[in-house]
Amino acid sequence: MSASPTNLEVQGNLMRVPPPKELNRSVERRRSSEEAQKPVIRRPVNVSVPRKPAATNTTKPATTTMKGDESAAMKAKIVSLEDEIRRLKRRIEELEKDIVELQKQMKTKDKRITDLTKENDDLKKR
C-alpha cells in the first residue's frame, strides 16, 4: 500500500471519496443558474436595466465563474438600488411641491375665514 489512489483523501481515521469533477461542475453551474433565475421583487421603474449574459466558459475554474456571477449580480443589485433611489428622490420632490401647494391653500382659506368672520361680526352689530 505504498501508492494510494489519487481520488481518495485521508481525513483523520476516515477516508472520503470526493464526487467526480464533472459532477461538481454541473452542480455549481446549476446553482449559479438557479441564483440567476431567482425572481427579484421590485417596484416598477420606467428605466429598464439591460442584463448581460453570463459567460459560460468551462475551461476556467469554477471559482472564477462564481466570482464573476456574484459580481454581475452585485452590479445588477447596485443599478436597481440606484434606480430606486432616483425614483424615491423624484417622489420626495413631488411631495414637497404638494406640501407647499397645500400650505398656500391653507393660508388662503384661513384668510377667507377671517374675512368672513369679520363680515359676520359686522352684520351682527348692525
Image: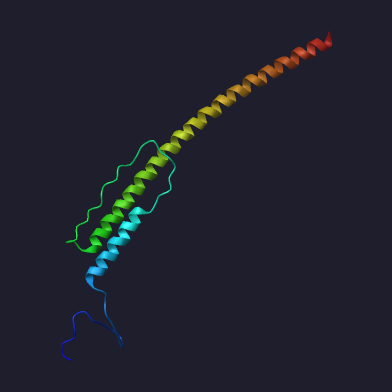
Q: Within the image, what quadrant is residue 124 found in?
A: top right
The percent coordinates of residue 17 (x first, y second) are: 26, 80
Q: Is residue 45 above or below residue 100?
A: below
Q: Is residue 90 above or below residue 82?
A: above
Q: Is residue 7 above or below residue 104?
A: below
2 to the left or right of 103: left
113 to the left or right of 40: right
Residue sitting at x 15%, y 87%? 3
- Which quadrant of the rendered structure holds the C terminus? top right
Of the pair 16 and 76, the residue shown nearer to us: 16
- Which quadrant of the rendered structure holds the N terminus? bottom left
Residue sitting at x 33%, y 51%? 74
Q: Residue furthest bottom?
A: 1
The percent coordinates of residue 72 (x first, y second) are: 29, 51
The percent coordinates of residue 57 (x first, y second) are: 19, 57
Residue sitting at x 32%, y 52%? 73
11 to the left or right of 85: left
Q: How is the image coloured?
A: rainbow
